[in-house]
């Protein structure tokens, strides 16, 4: 069970991480697309008012993302909800900054690391692949670099963040842990025609 | 395909949302008669024309909102703006 904590006493300390992706995958045809399981990255969910002091501090309104000074990545996933990603230390520093907001509004932070799967799809064909399993418009003018959306991907409710790598189109896809294996397989199925390869999974909990 | 204009997420396929039925005011529990409660719970106008409805953006922003839909043509009008407190209320 996930630990609920207030920002004041939050300290990301998680037990050994086990990825929701348990199958092993043979070497596939190397191509344009790469799919990797990054579920081990520390993920926290922050909830507060959509226009309160916590929102000002996080600086990522709904639909946008921002890399904060401490190194964490903040995703504005819903009005009044943010996902904070990074190493345990980076996320802890960002969550600790919210401590002062508690006096002005209700603000909660929850360790999502073990409850959510996170995958990364990278490649110039990533948008075409997503179009096969999601009904949103993945063109640059609708979902530019840094965009964050929530939508159904292969019939699973997901948060999706565009987070390009070295100028190459890349998406982070989050879903509930219990759907992780299914969604991973569905993404492989969708990406095969573009030459998708599965990168080695990271099964260790990220830490400083 | 029915595109529903969510005030936060923009136009979304109706399969991404949950239909919440007609939007009408909840009677005051301190003064409502049994007949009024019955009407609130079970009776619907069901017009062939414009109707204010509640929708839940289940796959997107997870917010309720109310909007007018023409039940004959599936046109939408008067979507609430982001942050509008109307929500599912009439």
Image (cartoon, coloured by chain):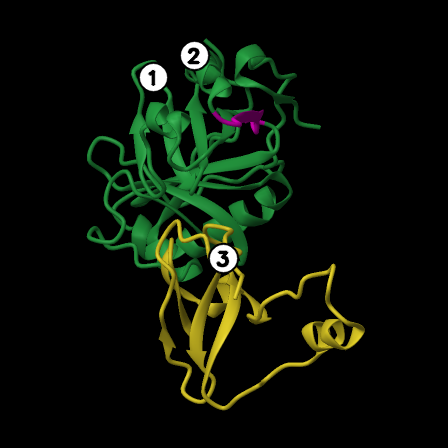
> What quarter of the picture does the N terminus of chain A occupy?
top right
Q: Is residue A4 left or right of residue A122?
A: right
> What quarter of the picture does the C terminus of chain A occupy?
top left
In this view, which residue lies farthest toward the top? A208
Q: Is residue B87 left or right of residue A121?
A: right
Whole-percent x, y for residue B47 in the image = 53, 88
Q: Is residue B62 above or below residue A77?
A: below
In the figure, the green chain has which letter?
Answer: A
Q: Residue at x 29, y 54 (%)?
A: A138
Figure quadrant of residue A148: top left
The residues colored magenta run A105-113
Which chain does tag 2 point to? A
Task: Write down the residue under mark 2.
Answer: A93
- Camera sees residue A23: yes
In the figure, the yellow chain has which letter?
Answer: B
How many numbered markers are drawn?
3
Sequence-earlier tag: 2 or 1: 1
**Label 1 near label 2: C-beta < 8 Å?**
yes
Q: Is residue A116 left or right of residue A73?
A: right
**A179 and A181: which is toward the camera:** A179
Whole-percent x, y for residue A135 in the image = 40, 62
For residue A71, the mark is 1
Whole-percent x, y for residue A79 in the image = 42, 42
Q: Is residue A207 left or right of residue B37?
A: left
**A38 and A137: which is toward the camera:** A137
């Amino acid at each position: 069970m996930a630990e609920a904590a207030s920002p004041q006493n939050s300290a990301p300390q998680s037990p050994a991480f086990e990825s929701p992706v348990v199958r092993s995958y043979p070497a596939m045809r190397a191509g344009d697309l790469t799919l990797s399981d990054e579920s081990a990255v520390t993920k926290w969910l922050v909830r507060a008012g959509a226009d309160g002091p916590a929102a000002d501090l996080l600086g990522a309104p709904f639909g946008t993302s921002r890399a904060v000074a401490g190194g964490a990545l903040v995703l504005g996933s819903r009005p009044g909800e943010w996902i904070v990603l990074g190493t345990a230390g980076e996320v802890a520093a960002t969550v600790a900054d919210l401590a002062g907001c508690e006096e002005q509004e209700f603000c909660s932070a929850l360790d999502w690391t073990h409850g959510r799967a996170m995958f990364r799809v990278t490649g110039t064909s990533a948008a075409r692949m997503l179009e096969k399993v999601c009904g949103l418009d993945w063109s640059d003018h609708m979902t530019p670099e840094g965009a964050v959306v929530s939508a159904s991907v292969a019939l699973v409710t997901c948060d999706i963040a565009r987070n390009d790598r070295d100028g190459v189109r890349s998406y982070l896809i989050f879903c509930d842990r219990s759907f992780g294996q299914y969604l991973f397989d569905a993404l492989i199925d969708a990406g095969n025609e573009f030459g998708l390869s599965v990168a080695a999974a990271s099964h260790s909990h990220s830490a400083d | 395909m029915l595109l529903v204009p969510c005030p936060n997420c923009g136009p979304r396929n109706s399969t991404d949302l949950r239909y919440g039925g007609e939007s009408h005011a909840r009677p005051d529990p301190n003064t409502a008669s049994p007949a009024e409660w019955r009407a609130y719970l079970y009776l619907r106008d069901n017009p062939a024309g414009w109707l204010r409805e509640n929708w839940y953006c289940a796959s997107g922003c997870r917010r309720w909102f109310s909007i007018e839909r023409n039940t004959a043509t599936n046109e939408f009008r008067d979507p609430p703006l982001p942050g509008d407190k109307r929500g599912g209320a009439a």
